[in-house]
Image (spheres, grey):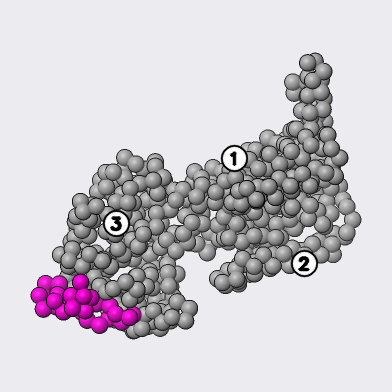
């Protein structure tokens, strides 16, 4: 469903992505592992349309999305839960969620309300706090809001970057449960997560990234692949 | 005591109400500036000329035989494509440059000068005075006020409220605020950020044009009319906080009242320096202004 070939990206003069190849299919969690600053977040941002690739292709199903504006990419069904959550200050929880509805235009009022109700059922805390400003929520609740906000669209691919950073263990469990549930609904999840051991529990396949390149790819179920990964990222 | 009441009824109150009628027009102008700054991070130096264009377009519409109410509806609509084109053709060209602040500032400043000369070429350099659309006056609690100024206060206040409702209580407004805060994230949720930029710029320009229509019957119309007024509007935006809607309203009322009341006691020549002095003081004590940015509410 997602096909990235020979992807290059620059920040000014620094060559951040130096030819990344990766593939993702419906119904799997694909994780990107690597130390800080190797380009994992840049891969996510480039696929989402926040960073323009300098070479290479990004295909979503049959559509080339590399270098397209982010709003067009999201309407195809690619959602992003970014690092640091990026909740809009000055917007209530409800307003944050309503913005998410724009990802899949052309739905009737009733369908939109149903989409909101569905995420409120999955995240009852958000319903209780829907009139509060988004940034007054706790870190865990903001992470839930960031996930709920893309889920009110109809994403087929979700890019999730550092979802558990700085969160309490109980909330981390909850987040991994949600990721598993979304995968089981047939979504492709591209995950960046520092907590490698926890991430491997939900991961199907992974890529190890070093200096803007994929240096190894393997299956999370394979013990040899896992130990090779640990050597590379040295954790 | 009765002396003070007389003073209030015949001197102070009329002056304050006059100040208020100017205040709402300044606020409309400042709202356009502050919304454009809050969303696009662009200081629109041509805003005063858009105000002048609004006033001149009102003259033209009037010359065609239409009355004031038609101007009020038609001129802002005519301003929308002007603002839209300015954003698309001028602002967007340099928007992604690293020197955006300086480039857009110089660009809009130069464009304002061009517009001013275009107005001179088309309408001539002379001052024109449109007829007052609503004549007569009304006595409220013993205070006499010209009807047109009364209309200006009520209509302006309603318009300011409407802008506030659109920005803070509608989905469109949520899109604008989200884009102002984090354009990448907004874009990834489906907000057409480019369209929002152009639309907001056009909206701000339409508000400037509307202030031009509203103030033309009071202040006369001439090509450089935007210059004095833009200074006041900028002062309001700076004191209120760049990008803040509440700030523009509070500072707009405050500063026009200071101007109106002080000119009773000191020479009106000194009321402007007083207002700008307040701006300098605010910049020294609270450089971000009284209120925060648009996205931050």
Disc 2 crowd, CA 10 A, few/some/many (<14, 14-19, 20+): some
Q: Which mark is residue A166?
A: 3
Q: Is residue B291 magenta?
A: no
**Whether residue B28 is situated above or below residue A11 in the rendered picture:** above
Classify mark 1: helix, strand or loop: helix
Q: Nearer the viewer, residue B81 or A88?
A: A88
Q: Same chain for the residues at labels 1 and 3, yes or no?
A: no
The quadrant where residue A52 appears: bottom left
Q: CA distance from mark 3 to mark 2?
A: 54 Å
Q: Is residue A87 left or right of residue A184?
A: right
Question: Is residue A20 placed above or below A147 in the rendered structure?
Answer: below
Which residue matches tag 1? B161
Q: Residue A57, position in %: x, y? A: 36, 80
The quarter in which the N terminus of chain A is drawn is bottom left
Q: Could you confirm whether marks 1 and 2 are on the same chain?
A: yes
- Nearer to us in this view, B99 or B78: B99
Vertical comparison of B146 with B224: above or below: above
The disc placed on residue B213 is none
Q: Chain of mark 3?
A: A
**Labels 3 and 2 share a subunit:** no
Mark 2, residue position: B114
Q: Position of residue B64 (x, y in %)?
A: 80, 52
Q: Earlier in the sequence, mark 1 or mark 2?
A: 2
B71 or A123: nearer the eye?
A123
Position of residue B254 relative to residue A51, above or below, is above
Q: Secondary structure at mark 3?
A: loop
């Amino acid at each position: 469903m997602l096909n990235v070939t020979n992807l290059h990206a620059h920040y000014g003069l620094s060559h951040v992505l130096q030819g990344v190849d990766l593939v993702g299919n419906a119904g799997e969690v694909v994780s990107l592992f690597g130390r800080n600053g190797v380009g994992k977040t840049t891969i996510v941002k480039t696929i989402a349309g926040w960073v323009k690739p300098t070479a290479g292709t990004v295909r979503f199903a049959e559509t080339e999305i590399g270098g397209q504006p982010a709003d067009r990419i999201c309407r195809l069904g690619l959602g992003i839960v970014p690092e640091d959550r990026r909740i809009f200050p000055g917007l209530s929880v409800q307003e944050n969620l309503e913005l998410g509805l724009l990802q899949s235009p052309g739905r009737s009022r009733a369908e939109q309300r149903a989409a909101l109700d569905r995420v409120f059922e999955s995240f009852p805390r958000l319903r209780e706090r829907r009139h509060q400003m988004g940034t007054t929520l706790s870190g865990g609740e903001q992470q839930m809001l960031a996930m709920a906000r893309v889920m009110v669209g109809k994403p087929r691919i979700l890019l999730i970057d550092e979802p558990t950073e700085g969160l309490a263990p109980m909330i981390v469990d909850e987040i991994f449960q949600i990721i598993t549930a979304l995968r089981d609904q047939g979504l492709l999840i591209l995950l960046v997560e520092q907590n490698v051991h926890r991430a491997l529990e939900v991961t199907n396949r992974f890529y190890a990234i070093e200096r803007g390149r994929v240096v190894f790819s393997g299956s999370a179920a394979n013990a040899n692949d896992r130990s090779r990964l640990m050597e590379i990222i040295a954790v | 005591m009765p002396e003070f009441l007389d003073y209030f009824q015949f001197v102070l109150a009329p002056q304050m109400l006059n100040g208020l009628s100017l205040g709402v027009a300044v606020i409309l102008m400042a709202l356009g500036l502050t919304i454009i700054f809050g969303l696009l991070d662009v200081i629109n130096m041509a805003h005063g000329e858009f105000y002048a264009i609004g006033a001149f377009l009102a003259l033209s519409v009037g010359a065609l035989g239409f009355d004031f109410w038609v101007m009020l509806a038609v001129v802002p609509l005519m301003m929308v494509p002007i603002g839209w084109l300015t954003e698309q053709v001028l602002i967007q060209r340099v928007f992604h440059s690293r020197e955006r602040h300086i480039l857009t500032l110089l660009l809009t400043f130069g464009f304002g000068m061009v517009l001013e000369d275009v107005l001179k070429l088309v309408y001539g350099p002379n001052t024109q005075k449109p007829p007052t659309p609503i004549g007569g006056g009304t006595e409220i609690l013993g205070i006499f006020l010209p009807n047109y100024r009364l209309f200006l206060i009520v209509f302006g206040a309603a318009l300011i409220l409407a802008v506030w409702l659109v920005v803070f209580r509608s989905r469109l407004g949520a899109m604008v605020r989200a884009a102002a805060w984090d354009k990448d994230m907004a874009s990834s949720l489906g907000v057409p950020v480019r369209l929002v930029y152009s639309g907001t710029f056009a909206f701000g320009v339409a508000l400037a044009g509307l202030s031009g229509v509203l103030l033309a019957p009071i202040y006369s119309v001439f090509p450089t009319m935007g210059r004095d007024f833009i200074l006041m509007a900028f002062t309001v935006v700076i004191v209120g906080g760049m990008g803040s809607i509440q700030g523009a309203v509070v500072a707009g009322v405050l500063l026009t009242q200071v101007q109106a009341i002080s000119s009773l006691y000191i020479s009106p020549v000194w009321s402007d320096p007083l207002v700008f002095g307040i701006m300098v003081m605010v910049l020294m004590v609270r450089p971000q202004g009284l209120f925060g940015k648009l996205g931050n509410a």
